[in-house]
Image (spheres, rainbow, N blue to C red):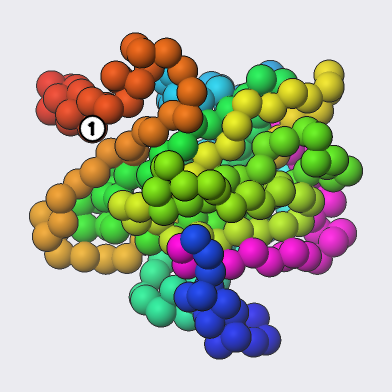
Amino acid sequence: MEDVSALAVEFKDGQPFPLLVIDGFLDEGFAEQLLKEFPSIEQMAHSKDYIFGDKREEAAFAHAGPACQEYHDYLLSGEFADFVGAIAGRKLFMDPSFHGGGFHQGGDGSYLDTHVDFNIHPKHKDWLRVLNVLLYLNKDWPAEYGGDLLLRTNPKDEPRAIAPLFNRAVLMLTSDNTYHGYRRMSLPPGVTRKSIAGYAYELVEEDNLKSRTTSWVPEGGGLVKKTLAKHWTTLAAAKNKLSGN
């Protein structure tokens, strides 16, 4: 918070698209408390990534304990809104429902295929998603565990890899070419990849932008998976129209 202007420049110059990596994001003792309050993977529901991912999510992370409540409240504070707005150069606010965010956790075999995120909030047609705020809570994480956040602007490019290290935050732009994900991990028993995610939005004119669902570009998988991914946007739009979601 003491040198936001320098961080804004670093964000703008980020590669392969605007992003910022901050180590020691929180006070070390506070980050330790967040980790202690993190639920077991068995307590969390599977995410709705269908065949394109294997991880767990829990949006209501504030109820996990006092440190999580404090972090939740800070992310929703005016101070933090000013911070992310200064970083991105836009007037932003955090989603108080943490739709698709909160606790994220993956165990052995967990993965998340390459994708770009949805752009318009499903319950607020005038909210444009601009920034992902990711906090990793993985202590003693050797490189052989994998789970690196892989970033690229073209799914055919070699990605930039960011290790999900303890108390490391990644603030990354989300747009129609900010491809990201992580490859299938091989983890020993009892070890999981943990993070807390929040998303910053900008108010826009309703219906001024075409709504886009999460778009998947898996690196591997068979013909069925790749065919589904290719037509996923059309299929999701049809499902949402029929269900009213």
* In the image: residue 7, left or right of residue 180: right
The location of residue 142, given as percent across then percent down, is 85, 40
For residue 146, what is the image quadrant? top right
Relative to 213, is 236 above or below?
Answer: above
Asked if the stretch drawn in magenta spans residue 31, the answer is yes
In magenta, the rendered stretch is 17-39
Relative to 45, is 224 above or below?
Answer: above
The location of residue 48, given as percent across then percent down, is 43, 25
* In the image: residue 21, left or right of residue 85: right
x 23%, y 26%: residue: 231
Nearer-the-camera pick, 34 or 136: 136
Nearer-the-camera pick, 41 or 78: 41
Q: Residues within 10 Å of mark 1 (few under 14, many from 20)?
A: some
The location of residue 73, given as percent across then percent down, is 58, 60
x 76%, y 56%: residue: 167
x 38%, y 45%: residue: 117
* In the image: residue 123, left or right of residue 46: left
The residue tagged 1 is 233
Q: Amino acid at mark 1?
A: Thr
Relative to 122, is 56 above or below?
Answer: above
